[in-house]
Image (spheres, coloured by chain):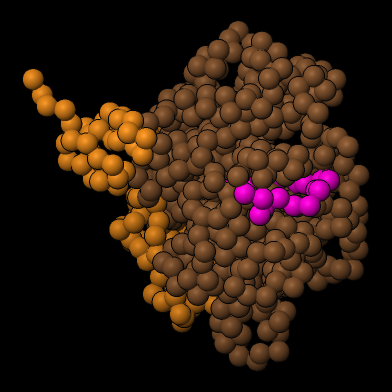
Chain colours: A brown, B orange
Amino acid sequence: MVTGGLTKFAKAHPAMDFRLMVKRAYDSALKGVPNLSADRIDGTRISYFSDHFTRQLKAASMVQDYLGMNPKGSVRIEWGGATGGECFQAAYEAVASGRMDVCLAAGFETMSRVATWKGNEFIALASDTNFDFPLGGFYTGYYALMVIRHIYEYLRLGKFASVKDEREAQRLAIAEGQRIMSMVSVKNHRNALHNPYAQYPKRLTVDDVLRSEMISYPLTREQICTMSDGAACAVLCTEERAKEFTDRPVRITGVGCGTDTMRLADRPFGRVPLLPHERARDYENLRYPGVHSFRAGRAAGIEAYRMAGITNPRAEIDFIELHDAYASSEIQTYEDLGLCKYGEGYGFVERGDPFLKGIDYGFPTPKAGATPVNPSGGLIACGHPVGATGLMQAVFAFWQLQEAIPKQFGDRTLQLAAPKRGAIHSHAGTGSSVTVSILERGFR
Amino acid sequence: MRARPPSFTRFRDAQAELSRSGAVLFRDADGVESLVIRYPYAIDYIHSYAEDSPFFLALAEGRLRGSKCRKVKCGFVYGTPRSHCMVCGTPTEWTDLPTRGRVHSWTTCHFGSEAFLHETPYNLALVEFDGVGSLLLVRLKDCAEADLYVGMPVEARFDPAPKYSITDVWFVPAR
């Protein structure tokens, strides 16, 4: 990857349609690399999630011609919430296969064109329309079902195992889960105060998050990402070409993708696919994935780590831009990606591992800096214009690895100290498809 | 000649006016003005339940049906039916599900997508059945958020006036 760019994500950008948003992101990407002009780009991969939101079929063709890319090759990518992550990997494949030397990955979404609850309906059409959608058609509801079970498996049967009264034990476990999820929300909103691209930077307390409006029990408004307008892009090329464009390229060393059933009700109860640093005896009594974990995320991690030669992700990855559509799914994903064992996600937050060093979150974070997750603020604070989101993560990770955060954000707070390797994680549906890509510093 | 549509700087206000008059000007922080119109569209979608049809026909008769893999060595039983086995690819046969089960997980939705907003709050539950390998997502009625818990015994109720929808069945706390 030699450059990237994005628009600020916003509730609505009525002054820009999707073509102009992508053009702005593209122009900002090209600004930093004077030798990279449109004629050096061999083709494009363009992503957006929902034709319902654009009310314009073949919108990717309109982006292609607005950018002046015709008659070069292009294809539209759609894979639910993981659309942006898939677009990134599609561009990677175009280059890795030898088909192109230089490929532009561009993504966007314009979600402001319908009211919020109609937007939720459009999104919920990404659930089975025979069995799931007619019951309420609400993604926050699906994620609430998953986290209630996650809390049951790992807090009720863990920290609260000794409480005799079943309903009291579950009540205590949910309250504990809500408190820890709120710490994740505080983290992501707080980090975003230093990110000028973020939609909702805020200084919040755990109580603020807990007291925000209940959307679907136990998830409150501040634990959930919002809908956004925005665009992002990344330029990927061969190692040879990269030298012509920048002396600070970022190498993509691993790509992984996993899937699972569309319906939560169909998820199996089997064995955990193990990462190299785990043992079967770690999970003897765990029925996996059930509805509490994302097998697709685990599969994507296994593939990407194997390709990148990562055997212990917590020790070998310096930071992760993780698809935190919900504070709950951020915690579930720590476990899928092997940052901690299954069941340790809540403790991982409480110890402070995913927090940044040197930022005061309003509570102790003793291990802050161990594995920063969403230093940018993630989806919860930056916004989630679906087709752009995975590419936004790529751009933020790229700037981290280039140590360009101070320049790009005008603020050095979020810049990690000489990071060597980062991961980006893009997640769709109720975990029905997930991508993980590994990015590494490609210069001395 | 028609006057210029009213201009707004808050998107929320622009949205509200749109539903009244159908056109507004939106002025952003940079002073750029955009003409925004309302563009309604509605469709009658011809939705076939296709191979899932027997499930919905059975619901209308007050029966809950799952499916079972025909391969003897597999025999996986699905709580949400599918016509081919996900494990081994063999066609399945219809089988009656128990009408009593337990809550595997649950939530109370205080919001929902537009089509269901007027029904909030409502409970969703994934129900597990003895002898069945997968779950069924349903509405759970006659109980409040504070009464719900994992493991709660529940039983099915059927709509006497079926709409041929998954909402023709719902569960309530078992007596």
Q: Is residue A140 left or right of residue B120?
A: right
User: Vertically, is B168 above or below A180?
Assistant: above
Query: Between residues A88 and A199, which one lies in front from this camera angle?
Result: A199
Residue A434: % across, % down: 68, 45
Residue A364 figure quarter: bottom right
Q: Residue furthest bottom?
A: A164
Q: Position of residue B119 (x, y in %)?
A: 33, 61
When the figure is inspected, residue A104 is found, relative to residue B55, above or below; the finding is: above
Which residue is pictured at 83% across the width and 67% down the height? A283
Q: Position of residue A278 (x, y in %)?
A: 89, 61
Q: Is residue A429 magenta?
A: yes
- Foreground residue, A389 or A431? A389
Q: Nearer the viewer, residue A333 or B130?
A: A333
Count the numbered circles shown.
Answer: 0
Q: Write the residue at 63% across / 37% down.
A: A391
**Residue A116 drawn in magenta:** no
Q: Quadrant of the N terminus of chain B?
A: top left
Residue at x 46% of width, y 39% of height? A229
Left or right: B145 as drawn, with respect to B86: left
Q: Which residues are magenta?
A: A411-434
Any part of residue B130 in sight: no
Q: Is residue A240 left or right of residue A28?
A: right
Identify the residue at horizontal 58%, vertical 49% (top origin).
A195
**In this view of the protein, can residue A286 be seen by the observer?**
yes
Which residue lies most toward the left here?
B1
Between residues B99 and A146, which one lies in front from this camera angle?
Answer: A146
Residue A193 found in image quarter: bottom right
Q: Is residue A11 left or right of residue A307?
A: left
Q: Position of residue B137 (x, y in %)?
A: 53, 59
